[in-house]
Image (cartoon, grey):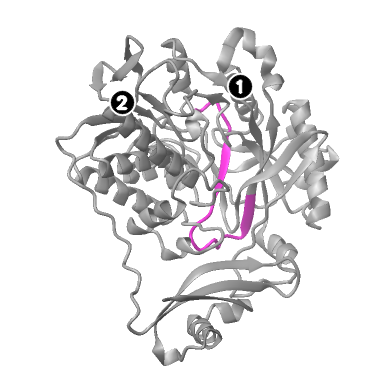
């Protein structure tokens, strides 16, 4: 029977896998030459105090012991099976499609955007401050917003589904095996597009269908049951419809509302991207002037209550880049990401505050459940009006933002389209600017040096989650009034990241099998 040994080592020692295997064998009372396989099963960094330590768990298999089989998935041929329409190819849609295939159903996946390669070309134009294609950008296209995020794979919820199976599916499709054991697994923007392409190939090889450049424009509902969707003048029908459109598909909410399908306003969060030199974050977190070659770019998680309102870091990207994430030329929206090596000069994070339903109650009479969506859009458009040409974003030095003064200059940045100086508190809602300012000041007490002239805040980080929830029954996971309609993922209000969305998509596929079976 295999043994798992946990070691606490220096970063340099933990990087030597042969040393780790020898120490683990010694601790287990096994001769090194009798170990057939030694593999890492868990690794985390303890940087709470100097010196930094690495906790690493090694699983040891002795000679003649059965070893774990390579990761493999077999998908049946579903070419002639019952069809299910899946709207959206983000993590929720893709993993719903994979699970539907496992259960013997044929997914017909509709994606408004383009395949990976042409989508990359459109994103390159956006980064060069060229025009935005509203259907092919950082939010829309093969893999959804997840394709060109950095692929953080952490979820706090253990009730959504088989977390390990989701990670193994990503490894099977090309992710590095490190995501199976790192405490905070991460894939990287440079690797995700290939993984998404491989998943799409798995779906089509099994007989599923993926149609790109297919924006859903309507829903076909007869006697309280959804029969399919409309793509322009075409009707595409199926035994059920998975709605996995992501948090940026604002037109879908308007279409649902127009077609009389009930929606609900919900709380969400908005704020800014904050960017520091990575060397500064490393020195604060690792208690060292330089992190050296054996430690990764340092990350952080910050949260505080400011006058009863939560302010927190979100989607922290060490060694990463800020990118233009708007889907319309009238908006200024930013997001962050990291390559697999996390080797850029900057560290960035979303820094956001709660937006409660009462904060946009003044819009409810006119816009009903879409009031939060309108509130979000108003902030994105205000950021655009206070930015520069096209994707040039409004920004302010962190020390100036906290002090409430204009920045006469801005430091260098990872944001390729460019920045222009702007007093963010002059066009943000007052409660939001106040909460962010006080929150950042409080974070400086936790991470000395966080408030600095060398860091910037960039506007706006507004797509942390959707301001709208598409309701679903807690038992059937269907919309309460439209049988066969299964909302899922971030866009429906039921997930908050790649893995949580993927697991929610799998849950929906299981619920569909039960629904069709009945």
* Between 281 and 178, the one nearer to me in the picture: 178
Could you tell me which secondary element the residue under label 1 belongs to? helix
Q: Is residue 87 left or right of residue 77?
A: right
Q: Tell me the crowding category of disc 2: few under 14, some 14 to 19, or many 20 or more residues within 10 angstroms, Cα based.
A: many
Instruction: State which quarter of the image contains the C terminus.
Output: top left
State whether residue 346 is above or below residue 26.
above
Return the x and y of residue 157 as percentages of the image width and height. 55, 46
Check if residue 346 falls in the magenta segment.
Answer: yes
Residue 27 against residue 146 in the figure, above or below: below
Q: Quadrant of residue 110?
A: top left
Which residue sits at x=50%, y=87%? 22
Tell me how far mark 2 sits from mark 1, CA to CA: 29 Å
Magenta stretch? 328-348
Residue under label 2, please give it.
240
Q: Residue at x 31, y 39 (%)?
A: 97
Q: Is residue 332 left or right of residue 402?
A: left
Q: Secondary structure at mark 2?
A: loop
Using the rendered view, name the quadrant where residue 116 is placed: top left
Residue annotated with mark 1: 372
């Amino acid at each position: 029977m295999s043994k798992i040994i946990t070691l606490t080592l220096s970063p340099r020692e933990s990087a030597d896998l042969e040393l780790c295997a020898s120490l683990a064998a010694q601790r287990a009372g096994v001769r090194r030459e009798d170990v057939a396989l030694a593999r890492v099963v868990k690794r985390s960094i303890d940087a709470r105090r100097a010196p930094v330590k690495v906790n690493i768990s090694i699983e040891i298999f002795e000679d003649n012991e059965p070893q774990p089989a390579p990761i493999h998935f077999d998908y049946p041929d579903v070419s002639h099976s019952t069809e299910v329409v899946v709207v959206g190819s983000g993590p929720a849609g893709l993993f719903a499609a994979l699970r539907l295939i496992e259960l013997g159903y044929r997914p017909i996946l509709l994606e408004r955007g383009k395949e990976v390669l042409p989508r990359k070309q459109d994103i390159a134009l956006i980064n060069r401050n060229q025009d935005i294609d509203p259907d092919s950008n950082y939010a829309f296209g093969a893999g959804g917003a997840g394709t060109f995020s950095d692929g953080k794979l952490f979820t706090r919820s253990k009730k959504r589904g088989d977390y390990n199976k989701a990670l193994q599916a990503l490894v099977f499709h090309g992710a590095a095996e490190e995501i199976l054991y790192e405490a905070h697994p991460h894939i990287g923007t440079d690797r995700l597009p290939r993984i998404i392409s491989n998943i799409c190939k798995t779906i089509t090889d099994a007989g599923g269908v993926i149609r790109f450049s297919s924006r859903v424009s309507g829903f076909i509902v007869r006697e309280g049951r959804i029969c399919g969707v409309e793509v322009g003048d075409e009707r595409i029908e199926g035994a059920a419809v998975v709605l996995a459109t992501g948090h940026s598909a604002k037109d879908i909410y308007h279409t649902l509302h127009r077609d009389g399908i009930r929606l609900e306003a919900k709380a969400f969060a908005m704020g800014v991207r904050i960017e520091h030199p990575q060397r500064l974050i490393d020195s604060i977190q690792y208690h060292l002037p330089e992190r050296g070659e054996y430690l990764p770019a340092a990350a952080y998680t910050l949260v505080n209550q400011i006058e009863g309102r939560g302010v927190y870091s979100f989607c922290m990207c060490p060694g990463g880049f800020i990118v233009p994430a708007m889907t319309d030329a009238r908006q200024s929206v930013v997001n962050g990401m990291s390559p697999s090596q996390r080797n850029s000069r900057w560290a960035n994070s979303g820094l956001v505050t709660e937006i409660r339903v009462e904060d946009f109650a003044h819009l409810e009479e006119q816009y009903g459940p879409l009031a939060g969506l309108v509130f979000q859009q108003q902030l994105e458009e205000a950021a655009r009006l206070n930015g520069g040409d096209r994707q040039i974003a409004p920004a302010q030095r962190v020390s100036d933002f906290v002090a409430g003064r204009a920045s006469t200059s801005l430091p260098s940045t990872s944001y390729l389209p460019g920045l222009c100086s702007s007093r963010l508190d002059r066009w943000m809602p007052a409660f939001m600017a106040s909460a962010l300012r006080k929150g950042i000041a409080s974070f400086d007490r936790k991470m000395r040096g966080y408030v600095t002239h060398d860091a910037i805040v960039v506007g706006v980080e507004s797509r942390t989650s959707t301001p709208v929830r598409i309701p679903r029954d807690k038992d059937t996971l269907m919309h309460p009034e439209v049988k066969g309609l299964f909302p899922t993922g971030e866009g429906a209000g039921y997930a908050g990241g790649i893995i949580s969305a993927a697991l929610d998509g799998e849950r929906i596929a299981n619920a569909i099998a039960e629904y069709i079976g009945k």
